[in-house]
Image (cartoon, grey):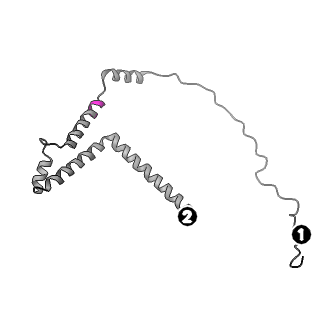
Amino acid sequence: MVMADFAGWFLGMRCRLSLYGLLFAWLCASGSLLDVAQGFAWLRMCAGYTQTMPLTVALHRTFDPEKPCEICTAVLNARKAAEAGHQPAEKALIEKMTLIAASAEPELTPPVFEVWPALVNLFAEARSYPVPVPPPRCGAVC
């Protein structure tokens, strides 16, 4: 019983772990991870400013584009690098067009027909002899 509970827990954990991994990969591929980092930077800046000034002034200074923190600067540089990396060069574009225009000859192979063995009997054979009975035991006196 305990092993069955562990197996169910393990399969559930494996499913959740794969879903979390897929979510993290999607966040990385779509660039949303930079949004998460930017939100963390804003929260950190706002928390730091609210220790010494009112909330409205802290929010104004947090979202002031003239005074970015080091995390905001790093996120901005990462966004610029990602945008520069996504723009295709002319040579890469021409190679892609050539690849799209290239056609491969289809392979023509004859179908393979396998012969299945015929089924002789679908049912199990019935016994034609009686089941052997073991010899009687001697009982209490041997």
Residue 62 percent across, percent down from the top left: 15, 48
In magenta segment, residue 85: yes
Q: Residue at x 52, y 22 (%)?
A: 105
| Res 10 label | none
The image quadrant where one finds the C terminus is bottom right
Q: Is residue 64 left or right of residue 12?
A: left
Q: Main secondary structure of the magenta part?
A: helix
Judged from this view, the residue extending furthest toward the bottom is: 140
In magenta segment, residue 121: no
Q: Residue at x 87, y 59 (%)?
A: 128
The image quadrant where one finds the N terminus is bottom right
Query: Which residue type carries mark 2?
Result: Val
Bounds of the magenta segment: 82-86
Residue 12 percent across, percent down from the top left: 47, 56
Which of the marked residues, 1 or 2, is nearer the chain's N terminus? 2
Residue pointed to by mark 2: 2
Q: Is residue 126 left or right of residue 55?
A: right
Residue 134 percent across, percent down from the top left: 87, 67
Q: Are marks 1 and 2 in contact (CB under 8 Å)?
A: no
Q: Is residue 54 above or below residue 103?
A: below
* Mark in front: 1 vs 2: 2
Q: Residue at x 15, y 47 (%)?
A: 63
Viewer-nearest residue: 36 or 2: 2
**SS at mark 2 in the image:** helix
Residue pointed to by mark 1: 135
Q: CA distance from mark 1 to mark 2?
A: 42 Å
Viewer-nearest residue: 116 or 70: 70
Viewer-nearest residue: 84 or 120: 84
Q: Is residue 55 above or below residue 35?
A: below
Query: Which residue type carries mark 1?
Result: Pro
**SS at mark 1 in the image:** loop
